[in-house]
Image (tube, grey):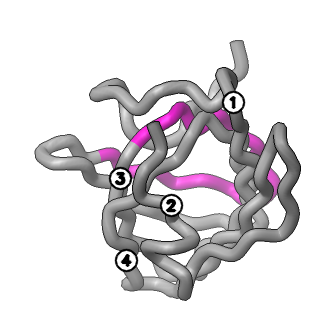
Amino acid sequence: MINDDPVRTNPDHYRILWENEFVRVLEYADEPGESTTAHDHPNSVMVTLSSFSRRLSAGDRVFETNLQEGQAVWLPAQRHAGTNTGGTPTHTILVELKGAAAGEISDGPLGPQTRST
């Protein structure tokens, strides 16, 4: 279940672009060195609008990622906090799934999955 909506927990970074009963589309933006507090994401597709480096953390689990502009990646349902660890702003679009497709948050891997199956 998604409890800590990033739009509410981190309103300086997330904004809703569009929503219906099936999906919600968010825009995310930050600057180098900025962080978010812990928040939840359902299963989502993330499209990068800029190249960036981030550290995601959830308890003792840490994930470092470097993504290039124009990538589309799968983000499984998860809870994390994030920090922009690079020298460029982060700018992404997230298409969050709703209903049964939203998935459940687990202790599985953090961060995006960059390979398609």
Secondary structure type for disc 3 = strand
Which of pointers 3 and 1 lies earlier in the amino acid sequence? 3
Q: What is the secondary structure assignment of the residue under circle 1?
A: helix
The structure residue drawn at horizontal position 39% and vertical position 73%, both measured from the top left corner, is: 36
Residue at left offset 24%, top offset 48%: 58
Q: Earlier in the sequence, mark 3 or mark 4?
A: 4
Question: Where is residue 91 shown, x and y percent of the image?
Answer: 68, 72
As shown in the figure, which amino acid type bears the numbered disc 4?
A: Ser
**Mark 1 or mark 2: whose residue is earlier in sequence:** 2
Residue 75 numbered mark, or none: none
**Disc 2 target residue:** 5
Residues at discs 1 and 2 in contact (Cβ within 8 Å): no
Q: Is 10 on the left or on the right of 108, as rendered?
A: right
Question: Which tag, 3 or 2, sits closer to the chain's start?
Answer: 2
Residue 76, by quadrant, is top right
Residue type pointed to by label 2: Asp
Spatial separation of the CA atoms under disc 1 and disc 4:
29 Å
Which span is picked out in magenta? Answer: 63-78
Residue ID for mark 3: 80
Residue 116 location, quadrant: top right
